[in-house]
Amino acid sequence: MNKGFGQFEVWFVTGAQLLYGGDAVIAVDGHSNKMVEGLNNSGNLPVKVVYKGTANSSKEVEAVMKAANNDEKCIGIITWMHTFSPAKMWIHGLQQLKKPLLHLHTQFNREIPWDTMDMDFMNLNQSAHGDREFGHICTRMRIRRKVVVGYWQDAETQHKIAVWMRVCAAWADAQDMLILRFGDQMNNVAVTDGDKVEAEVRMGYHVDYCPVSELMEYHNQIKDEDTNALVEEYFRLYDHDASLEDKSTEAYQKVWNAAKAELALRAILKDKGAKGFTTNFDDLGQTDGSHFDQIPGLASQRLMAEGYGFGAEGDWKSAALYRSVWVMNQGLPRGCSFLEDYTLNFNGEQSAILQAHMLEVCPLIAAQKPRLEVHFLGIGVRKSQTARLVFTSKTGAGCTATVVDLGNRFRLIVNDVECIEPKPLPKLPVASALWIPQPNFEVGAGAWILAGGTHHSCFSYDLTAEYWEDYAEIAGIEMVHINKNTTISELKKELRFNEVYYMLNKALC
Ligand code: MN
């Protein structure tokens, strides 16, 4: 799986022209070099910025855009117009560009040197109008991009670039993403289904069915010594009752079988180059042949932490989205998980939704060391004692997201949430989180339902709606953001306006 963002770079292209003479362009080139060096040395950007020089003509612009398209390391382009770069020279290049675009509206000099400023200085510090000229052509051509305004040395400006870079990395990752479905959707469920062809056209990832019988061929190949070693690793990593290590017990056998299931899943995912998967509790292999004796929930928990996308009950959209969340979240401190709206708690202003799943919650969001436990699970084709990691999640602000298929388009629904302290659940030994959707339970949940959101979502403490805004912009999909300012009547209007917008903009549907 990915190890940070070291394999990626973002290109920095400075728009210029030769009107002010070659010396001016040389000076601008020097400024650009210093800016890129400053950005890279700030420690605030997760992806390396590579300066690609000034683009002074239509031919040069087109050449750098084509090169960006064909460079696998390049996940996006930052443009900055130091001065007046006549925007017609950008038309052909922008028509070619397939990579995400960030337009940085900044200036080499922070402040106006009031006493010494002359026309030469002006010629080197005129992004105030150059960036507007560039903005016009992007808007005229309906080019999707992020516009970041701010001084290039300021941490807030760099943070906005950093957010976009993480999204670009997830986007690049998704263009080469395979999701394997072990079994089909859970029967009759609408919201987790959708158009897999359109998903690939719009969001890049590819979804394949994989018979559970093929997974079982990998299961058959797993060696006992590897399974033993993984069980030892579980006991080292997780709190557990000492009795769980008693090899004569059913509980130990269930942990052992869960470890074998994890090894089989990881082996087939690696072998096929898949970045995510779905399971279905009604399809766990043939009882009279090789099969899982329990839902592979522990495996799903651990594979999610490792970066594999996961969606339960065949939910391939959540599997793909979780993988993207995990990529964006790399190196950030608080973690992410696939979650499900489980049970409501009506309690006045503290009314909240318990987030859990039968088993499959990622330990990256745990507030404490996860506990390895075995309990009976009476759902699915094989009702059984089942291994799982049990924990509660950190408190604090987070953001959750889902993608639904509305028939003529995908809609990304994002909700800011506040995770609060849960009470102990001695009779429900699963991992969980408890959150208040913003602006409050009634409006947040009501808005989510009106927008057609799933009961599954992909949650992160570290990602904010800004990430999702960048994601929706790059993908060209609708985004509905439910937040502290949301009111039901305004949201209803937004949904109606969007319906018309996407009907008229066929290219975006
Ligand atoms: Mn579910």
Image (tube, rainbow, N blue to C red):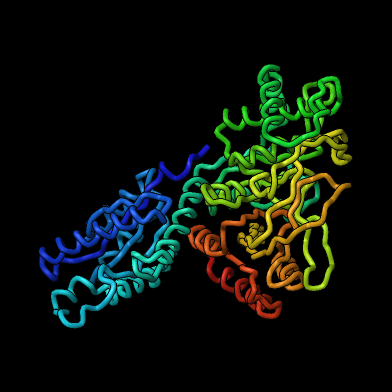
Residue 114 position in % (x across, y down): 20, 82
| The one of 368 and 179 positioned closer to us in this rendering | 368
Which image quadrant is residue 239 in? Answer: top right
Position of residue 331 in the picture relative to residue 397 (left or right): left
| Residue 283 in view here | no
As displayed, is residue 228 above or below residue 190? above
Identity of the residue drawn at 75% across and 35% down: 296
Residue 314 position in % (x across, y down): 72, 44
Give the mark count.
0
Image quarter of the C terminus = bottom right
Identity of the residue drawn at 50% across and 42% down: 176
Residue 307 position in % (x across, y down): 58, 41
Position of residue 154 in the picture relative to residue 327 (left or right): left
| The one of 385 and 293 positioned closer to us in this rendering | 385
As displayed, is residue 270 above or below residue 42? above
Position of residue 12 in the picture relative to residue 186 (left or right): left
As displayed, is residue 163 above or below residue 215? below
Identity of the residue drawn at 70% across and 17% down: 224
Residue 7 position in % (x across, y down): 41, 41
| Residue 114 in view here | yes
